[in-house]
Amino acid sequence: MDTIERHAPASASMYKGAGIYRYDDFDREFLRERVAEFRAQVARRLAGELTEDEFKPLRLMNGLYLQLHAYMLRCAIPYGVMSADQLRQFAHVARTFDRGYGHFTTRQNIQFNWIALEDAPDAIAALAEADLHAIQTSGNCIRNVTTDEFAGAAADETVDPRVYAEIIRQWSTLHPEFSFLPRKFKIAITGAPGDRAALQIHDIGLTAKRDAQGRIGFEVWVGGGLGRTPILGFRIRDWVPEDALIAYLEAILRTYNALGGRENIHKARIKILVRDVGQARFAELVEQEFATLPREKFRLDPAIVAAIEAHFTPPPFAAVPDAAAALAGAVAADAEFAAWVGRNTHAHREPGYICAVISLKPIGGVPGDCTAAQMDAIANLAEQFSFGEIRVSHVQNLVLPHVRQDRLHALWQALRPLGLATANVGLLSDIIACPGLDYCSLASARAIPVAQRIAERFADLRTQHDIGTVFINISGCINACAHHHVGHIGILGVDKKGEEFYQITLGGSASNDAALGDIVGPAYAYDDVVDAVETILRTYLAVRSPGEAFIETYRRTGLAPFREALHAAA
Amino acid sequence: MQAKVKAKGSAQPLVVSANRLRDGRVVWLAADGGWVEHLHGAVVYLGEEVDAGLAAGEADEQRQLVVGAYAVEVVETPGGMVPLRMRERVRVDGPSVLPVAAE
């Protein structure tokens, strides 16, 4: 726990904004050293002193992949929380080292697709200037922790998960024992009863909650993951006390590190270990490890928690007793604004405030893409309307978490000319799509143009609102970066003799009612897959009961009516 | 997951491709032994002739010019030579999509 102690803040007054973890001198010196180290590694590679086999693990430890057309730099946004200055720095990197845009991912990170190897050290140095880096965005380590995009703001939240996400970040960053795990390891955490972080598809999912006495503890899920062997995690513990959180995580990671497969990359994730030894036996092994750990060494001291909490003190909310009435008036006066408010906001815990979701899914756009100009504009709006805070959601949208209700209409008006006011959150055009074969060297098929064509087919937002909530997830390969298994409608791109085909699943969910989708039948050609999605949605409209959402209809009817309609249309 | 298809041994005409080390850009082996950014400048091999191209690619990997040289199947069309497989067509043409308002 030394790292956490060293990182304790000196005083809350040092923070420029609220709710953002602020680096101290130790953090910044560490990043400077890391940049210098990487710069030397790149120089040695370019000079021929390192082979590609020797260099590859080094560049991956700094988030640098070699993709289809260029190197891709994946930058960490810890638990999806960033400041306006940090977003501006991403815009700077996009302009200076890339082609003027970036791509927000389901891991709440951002990727730049056109980085040159010789520029990568300068790009990473630019990130470090804004307390940003690309550590733990690749490799077989504990990756960037993800959380609820409304953390610290949502009305339904019982515990602020950012505090524990930051603690886990500090515990896991360059953890010597867990830097060479059998495979990558992803942890998600939420502090609300409604799962907005897709806990059950993570290696570890944590729900922070309170007991009857108000003490904080964690419900722990383990063994989830998608890819070629999709498995939902199981609840290994209903309650781990706050002070035992790190010890319990250590116990899980140690058990996995000791017993996880290392021979076959496809059988190396913790989900395979849990499946093979069985949930009960795995839980026994973890408890045995937990019991033997020196508890005091791993005890999460309340003083440490308090020190981290100081980084996340609430922003200076104003008392705005008339804000709700002002918002209601604006909604009543403007139907288009009302539609946006209905889809793109979430209740805030502070009276008079609201969370606003900025859709990065304009009709015909690339899901998750954001231009440098848009990033700069959003940064300005965050400062103007949300205490300089921005969040990235795992569905590839951005959030301004703390907006005064009486200023929401002004925000919406400012977003419109930027192409950032699409009222489609949770609707069928709010599609999660991975970069797919347009960028990714692992992909089998394109995902982005399929998403664009589906959105364009249903471009009329009134139709989308009529269809209601439906999550469409499109992955360009079985690695499932777009979580297609848990989409209400999941689309998986596959390669058949060099051409693109798409397998469709129905009935998946990433929420509290997590489920893996069912395959509807043979895969569809690129030219036919959008027709198939339309058939599915029209079937839903035909068979739904009043007020019934897509997923509810599917659970009532099963595959049969959808299969029949698809068969008839073939 | 799509790996690079092992085209060596294919009855199709073949070219050799790689990514340039310094910037990662897609390149194709040309007749003069250099690497060009456009497929139409690539040298075409038939059958086992491609071994010479792959050997040249491996040598250029050792010289830190390219990364991951491999053979790619192509077909002749009225419009010129195109890769047989979608993955390689995307490498030739670049992404089929662009951000709505990229600067």
Image (cartoon, rainbow, N blue to C red):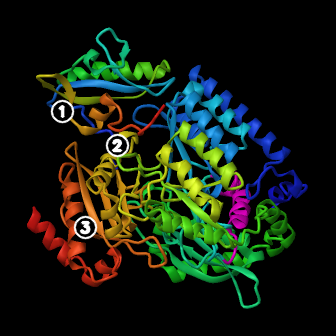
Q: CA distance from mark 2 to mark 3?
A: 26 Å
Provide the chain ID for the residue under circle 3: A
Please give the residue where the numbered disc 3 appears in the rendered image.
Answer: A537
Quarter of the image with the C terminus of chain A is bottom left
Label disc, if present, on residue B10 of the rendered structure: 1
Percent coordinates x, y for residue A8 in the rendering: 85, 58
Of labels 2 and 3, the one closer to you: 3
Marks 3 and 1 share the same chain: no
Rendered position, A352 above or below A133: below
Q: Secondary structure at mark 2?
A: helix
Provide the chain ID for the residue under circle 2: A
Residue bounds of the magenta highlight: A158-179
Quarter of the image with the N terminus of chain A is bottom right
Q: Secondary structure at mark 3?
A: helix
Q: Are marks 3 and 1 in contact (CB under 8 Å)?
A: no
Rendered position, A401 above or below B37: below
